[in-house]
Amino acid sequence: MKPQRILVVGAGHVGLYAALRLSRKLKAREAEVIVVDPQPHMTYQPFLPEAAAGSIAPRHAVVPLRRELRRCTILAGEVTSVEHARRTATVQPIVGPPREVEYDHIVLVPGSVSRTLPIAGLRENAIGFKTLGEAIYLRNRVLDQLDVAATTSDPATRARALTFVFIGGGYAGIEALAEMEDMARDALRYYPELRPDQMHWVLVEATQRVLPEVDPDMGAYTVQQLLKRNLDIRLGTRLESCVDGVVKLSDGDSFAADTIVWTAGVKAHPILARTDLPRDAKGRLTCLATLQVTGPEERPVEGAWSAGDCAAVPDLTKEPGVLCGPSAQHAVRQAARLADNLVATIRGRAATPYRHKYAGSVASLGLHKGVAQVYGIKLRGLPAWFMHRTYHLSRIPSWNRRIRVLIDWSLALFLRREVVSLGELHTPRESFTEVTPPVAL
């Protein structure tokens, strides 16, 4: 019998874990697993704040696909459309013409992208915090601004350079803000021209609380800790515009800032709109608890599977109609259940519904500071920070990465944090083109 072809679209949390499990459980004569992703690695997003702050090396926050998925076929490119009726996906390689890839089963897990709003100046002046490139850019940006502030003689330029605005009070925004402020404060020891109170770190959150995944008292504790560090927390406030870097807020305040970070939520990947599979009002694939894509009348679409941020999966541990949240905790467990159900389907067995009671959340608020709520147990400060690191160290794929991250953390106990900017990485050809004259043709 011809082996089944399984096409995995996306190599994020769900894609990598599912492909790895499928390749281990299925024999070569049963199935071929093909993974398509434009990046050659999976990014472990919970480590982005620490990579940005210099607590771990950036390359240790990613997992190389070809090293980890040795039994899979890796296609470096992007799926541009899916015609499930023909069981065909169109793949655009990094270079060259597009190609069609036929499949028997598709695991459509491209994840999510930043959910932005039509705010004047946002596209031109802000940056997200969802990819490794964005995290490293932000690190270099913050350190560059310290150099700008330390060198200029103009107070307005200094104030603008030392103003850092973060939009969104979820985990991504809180951790990015806390880690970057911690790093910048640490770096000021090398800037005698600057004082900590000259820095202006602003968090803008449209609701009246931060960290909605934990109880209100834990969110309030987080705000209190940030206020103790003289951070400017604006709850119940929206960004109105940021044209030319001038931030205008709904509370009437206005100030200039050279660094604006958007972390106000995510939305399903736009590739889902270029498929013939059913989606919900938010653009996510509608799924059964078995992680099979479902169409009208709650019937599974044969050969179509999804999970994670881009899938609307019912949460069986809660009342009917409630969906699983877009968290790494659900994504990793859904990946395992999806792979097991796909293996069962290929072997002629019934699929098992996904059921997982949300264990809780952990967040870092900078070095040796954190907040955690796990199975009803609430921790603050150093114990929460330690739990945050322990949990994520256990979840990042491969012992190779775990050991490297652990070494980074161990060295940080004895060596001071690196606070050098490598901003030239973002424009590597600039110095070469400056000395190379144009040639008339």
Image (cartoon, grey):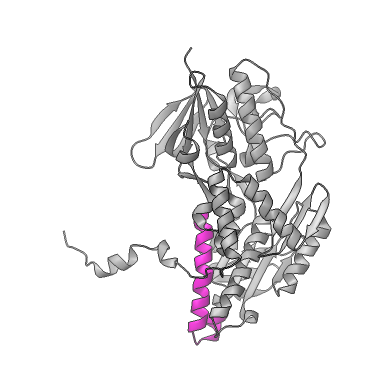
In the displayed structure, 213 sits above or below 10; it is below
In the displayed structure, 15 sits above or below 411; it is above
* Residue 291 coordinates in the image, percent (x, y): 66, 30
Instruction: Specify whether residue 83 is painted magenta.
Output: no
Instruction: Specify whether residue 154 is painted magenta.
Output: yes
Q: To which quarter of the image does residue 228 belong?
A: bottom right
Q: Using the image as rendered, state which of residue 143 and residue 155 is in the foreground.
A: 143
* Residue 87 coordinates in the image, percent (x, y): 50, 23
Residue that sits furthest to the bottom in the current view: 153
In the displayed structure, 36 sits above or below 290; it is below
Q: Quadrant of the C terminus?
A: bottom left
Q: Which residues are magenta?
A: 132-159
Q: To which quarter of the image does residue 231 belong?
A: bottom right
Task: Please tell me which residue is depicted at 69% across the width and 54% down the height of the picture.
Answer: 388
* Residue 213 coordinates in the image, percent (x, y): 75, 51
Q: To which quarter of the image does residue 353 belong?
A: top right
Q: Is residue 10 visible?
A: yes
* 197 left or right, relative to 220: left
* Most common secondary structure along the magenta stretch: helix
Task: Please tell me which residue is depicted at 65% across the width and 52% down the height of the picture.
Answer: 265
* Residue 221 coordinates in the image, percent (x, y): 79, 64
* 126 left or right, relative to 322: left
Q: Using the image as rendered, state which of residue 238 and residue 376 is in the foreground.
A: 376
Task: Please tell me which residue is depicted at 53% across the width and 46% down the height of the picture.
Answer: 400
* 319 left or right, relative to 24: right
Residue that sits furthest to the top in the current view: 1
Q: Is residue 115 visible?
A: no
